[in-house]
Image (cartoon, rainbow, N blue to C red):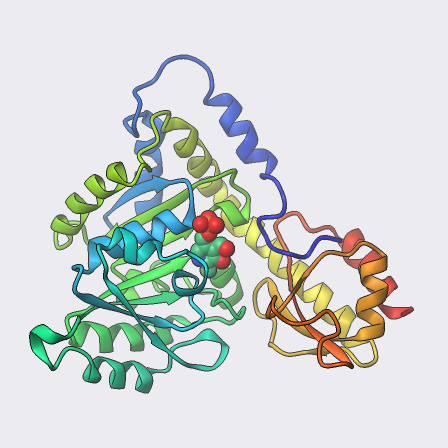
Amino acid sequence: MYFTSDNAVGAAPEILDAIVAANDGSLPSYGADPMMAQVESRVAEIFETECRVFLVSTGTAANALALASLSPPWGAVFCHRHAHIEVDECGAPEFFGGGLKLALLHGQDAKIAPDALRAAIADTGAGGVHQVQPAALSLTNVTEAGALYRADEVAALSEIARDANCAVHLDGTRFANALVASNASPADMSWRAGVDVLCLGATKNGALAAEAVIFFDPERQADRIAQFEYRRKRGGHLVSKGRMLSAQMAAYLKDDLWLKLARHSNDAAARLAAGLRRIDGVRIENSVEANMLFVHLPLSVHRALQAGDARYYLEPPSQSDEGNGESVRVRFVTSFSTSDESIDAFLSIAATA
Ligand SMILES: Cc1ncc(COP(=O)(O)O)c(C=O)c1O
């Protein structure tokens, strides 16, 4: 009954097996192994276009190094005020970006509204050398509030950004969950919608530790790609036994394992939501399209679940364990390995509280 995050579980067996299989023999290091070449061609096939792919071992490194390649130190990166790059990366984008500035936007469900983006871009940089200059837009899909951007919403925001000469970055830590929830193709949800760089997460969806930074349209982005390679090395993310990362990513993408795992995770969230909706006094705040739920739990239910050793986070974490005196707001996240049994055990405790 562990619903804290999708990284509270280990790795998918297929990915562990691939690491073990990659362990034999000697191979070129630093990403020059044959599995990395397979990853590049598989990514090109999945996304139906030419691209360059780089692997790193954390989502923070993927985001921060990607943004540093998209923005000069005097650039503004527009993002939601709840974006992971703002809230949970300890200033890594600003650090790797040499002081670039995150320009924070508001919006329901951690989604950026087109008008808010337009206004923020218009408000930024007109003072010339006295101000940071619009440089990039960063979106997260699935958002930090568990919501989805549809492909046409990504396209609308990208168009505004591109009209202002801003690059478009997508934090796709849960990109697979967004795809299966919206039935969009990887291409429609990324480069066809104007995304320049996608940080494709795998760790939260079954890998041990592997994230892919994908640059679309490599000819146009040659300078950014060249920069990225040096930045990745300087940032300590050019892993010497690179095959251990490429083996994970190759297995993740093989036979659409990534989509199968995300489908499981989203289905588990739907099962949990359906059960919670039957319990008196429980209110689910979001529409549960992917694998995250934001829920108001009556204190009696919260107490019973805690006593039953269920794990989940208060949201926000700064909230008292008494919530507002009647209920607490909590976050549940399901994963590729959440079992029906654990959900049912959790629901039966909640139902009898
Ligand atoms: C939306 C989002 N982006 C990026 C990350 C990157 O995480 P990490 O650096 O922990 O791998 C996370 C992890 O919680 C996330 O939820």
Q: In the rendered view, does 286 fall on the left or right side of 173?
A: right
Query: Could you tell me how many numbered marks the image carries?
Result: 0
Residue 337 pos. (x, y %)? 66, 47
Q: As displayed, is residue 289 above or below residue 267?
A: below
Closer to the camera in the image, 202 or 72: 72
Q: Quadrant of the C terminus?
A: bottom right
> What residue is rendered at 81% in x and 54% in y?
309
What residue lies at 8% left-to-right and 73% top-to-bottom? Answer: 129
Residue farthest to the top?
25
State the residue at coordinates (31%, 23%).
29
The image shows residue 261 at horizontal and vertical percentages of: 57, 49
The correct choice, above or below, for 130 with respect to 197 in the image is below
From what the image shows, is residue 21 above or below residue 59?
above
Name the spot of residue 170 as percent of width and height, x first: 35, 61
Asked which quadrant contains residue 229, the reply is top left
Residue in the foreground of this view, choosing between 162 and 259:
162
Q: Nearer the viewer, residue 45 or 297?
A: 297
Tell me if residue 112 can be seen.
yes
> In x, y percent, where is residue 120?
26, 82
| Horizontal relation, residue 280 to residue 117: left or right | right
Quarter residue 232 falls in: top left
